[in-house]
Image (spheres, rainbow, N blue to C red):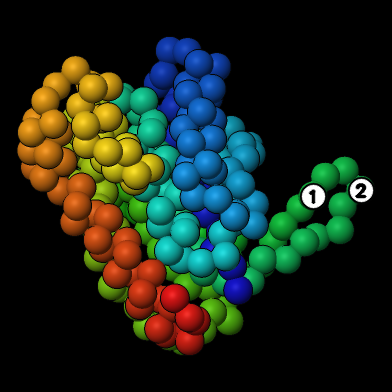
Amino acid sequence: MTVAIIADIVGSRRQPDRDALQQQIEDAAGQSDRLVPGADQPWRPTVGDELQAVYGSLGRALRATLVLQLAAPDDVECRFGIGYGGVVSVASTREELQDGPGWWAARQAIEHVHSLARRRVRSARTWFGAGVGAPREIAAITGLVNSYLVARDHMVGEMNGRARRLTLGRMRGDAQKDLADAEGISQSAVSQSLSKAGAPALMLLLDEIDGVEDALLGRSQ
């Protein structure tokens, strides 16, 4: 089983310089690839304003989407559909094609979160779904995962540019002193900004989901 991700750029048609926007998002995707290595398929642009990626675990997929959120330009947001399920190659003489329950679930998820953001939770940007054939243990925690994602999206949406940069730096493992020097602020200000933004909670929850996934699927940690 794999985890397929579809990302699209929120409001891309309203951006005045579409070429520059695409380059910025691809730069952010490159940061995600470097920080969350080992993707079955690293981020790649597809049609229009979409990108796609495939990971071997839910935990890695959640990390990859968070990094892309944090690394995106200050005035740009992405929407994500994450689908847990099989991904298969489709024979083609022109280019590599993929299909399968993982992609179907990802497409349903991104359509759902788009509707959710319009109707009920404006800050929602990410949704997770278990595709046909996914382990029942994974299907059983979709509500838990989506509760985390709704809270995460709200927290990231409330961050200013500095808070996102600092959170991303901590995910890279950068020391607070180095982050303070880069931002031209005190180490105490870095600590306060991270705490106010909820960065420690975001990273702790990622670790906890990793542990839940490993336990459910009987993987050694």
Amino acid on which disc 2 is placed:
Thr
Q: Is residue 138 visible?
A: no
Q: Is residue 51 above or below residue 36?
A: above
Residue beneath the point at 53% across and 41% down: 34
Q: Classify mark 1: helix, strand or loop.
A: loop
Extreme residue toward the top, this view:
16
Q: What percent of the width, then of the height, locates residue 200?
A: 19, 52
Q: CA distance from mark 1 to mark 2?
A: 8 Å
Residue 176: name its quadrant.
Answer: top left
Mark 2: give few (<14), some (14-19) or many (20+) Cα within 10 Å. few
Which residue position is annotated with label 2? 93
Mark 1: give few (<14), some (14-19) or many (20+) Cα within 10 Å. few
Q: With 190 as the anchor, is 63 left or right in this view?
A: right
Of 94 and 32, which appears nearest the observer? 32
Which residue position is annotated with label 1? 96
Q: What percent of the width, then of the height, locates residue 67?
A: 39, 43
Q: Is residue 75 visible?
A: yes
Of 84 and 192, which appears nearest the observer? 192
Q: With 9 as the anchor, is 89 left or right in this view?
A: right
